[in-house]
Amino acid sequence: MTASAGIVDILADEVPEIAIDAALCKKCGICTAVCPADVFEPDPSGLPIVVHRKLCIWCDRCEIYCPDFAIRLRGRRGW
Amino acid sequence: MPVFPTGDIIDSHFRTSTLPHIWCPGCSHGIVTRALAQALDNADADKDRTVLVSGIGCSSRATGYLDYYTIHTTHGRALAVATGLKLARPDLRVVVISGDGDTGAIGTSHLVHAARRNIDLTLVCYVNNTYGMTGGQGAPTTQCGDITSTSPFGHLERPLDLCALSQAAGAAFVARATAWHYDLLVRLIAKGIEKKGFAVVEAVSSCPVYAGRLNGQDTPAQMLFAMREQGVSDPGAALGAGQFRIGELWDVEAPEYVETYHRQARGRAGR
């Protein structure tokens, strides 16, 4: 929580950086299935690719449901 | 306290050099282990004063990945080793990681007697309804009618309810959540860790490779979504087929064994 709580945080990011660690990913497809905003699409090998980053609503689902700890959401939240 | 999971939990609570872990693609054990790490963080567990003890099985590999003092014991005996550890060093916080086969079959007597003594341990039991590590054999928690590699025409035995068993045996805190109900799982494990007495948290996980594939659940995500329907949090709601209650199931105050033991020992020694 920033000191300016209650005021719109102009430094906040609209969407996070979505980092997928290909060395950890086991291509189970959970992130693609749980994402409510269809941010991911699997490439031919099954590795999830961030295709619509701007649609991300920062719900954290992909990060917490990734059983292989391969997804990291980075950025400054506005809330 | 709201849960805002971030990758920091992985960096600060895991031995990241040991990753990727051995669990199969889509195995919910990873989600449950992250919830456990988050709960240890929420409960302000001191890394030098917390010991994680596990038995044998897929779930019990978790101790290898978590950056705490850890003991990987023999099959079913995690609670027995943890009991000895807690009695010798009451200052340590001891969390036991175990699977349903470990707790419900090979080590059932240890579960019953740890609960009976109400010793200050926290048991996090990963329940995936099968023996994943050895090839998907039927476990005591396998649902009636499920296909396993040892029951190709459907499992005939009825499943064992580990929560009801622990409650009947005398545990002070009994709770259940699933990998899907992540925030609830984090809260319940943290509460179990802080509870004085024997706390059992059943973490419903999934085995997509054996249990899922043999029972028509083709993808790991399908199994995860199924947990949303299976877990019933309303205590008054009727349970349908395959459903179970989640949340806090039992929470009482009872005399704790280590405390009473040391009080008696001090009394006998005249101190």
Image (cartoon, grey):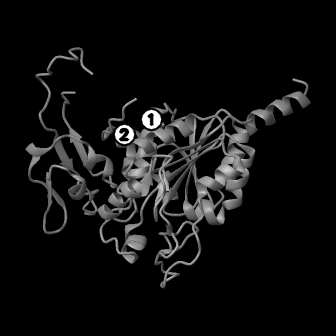
Query: Residue flagged by tag 1: what amino acid is it?
Result: Asp
Query: What's under tag 2, amino acid-wise?
Result: Ile
Coordinates of residue A75 in the picture (x, y in percent): 18, 34
Q: Are marks 1 and 2 on the same chain?
A: yes
Which quadrant would the N terminus of chain B be assigned to in this image? top left
Task: Report the residue at 49% width, 58% height from top.
Answer: B59
Give the residue displayed 50% in from the left and 37% down from the top.
Answer: B190
Q: Which is nearer the N-term, disc 1 or disc 2?
A: 2
Q: Is residue B43 visible?
A: yes
Rounded to the nearest angstrom, the CA distance separating label 1 from label 2 is 8 Å
B240 to the left or right of B116: left
Q: Name the residue that disc number 1 marks.
A: B41
- Locate residue A59 relative to residue B1 in the image: left or right: left
Where is residue B102 shown, x and y percent of the image? Answer: 59, 62
The residue where tag 2 is placed is B9
Placement of A23 over or under B193, stated as above or below: below
Compared with residue B111, is residue B3 higher up or lower down, i.e. above or below?
above
Circle 1 crowding by C-alpha within 10 Å: few under 14, some 14–19, many from 20: some
Q: Is there CB contact under 8 Å for labels 1 and 2?
A: yes
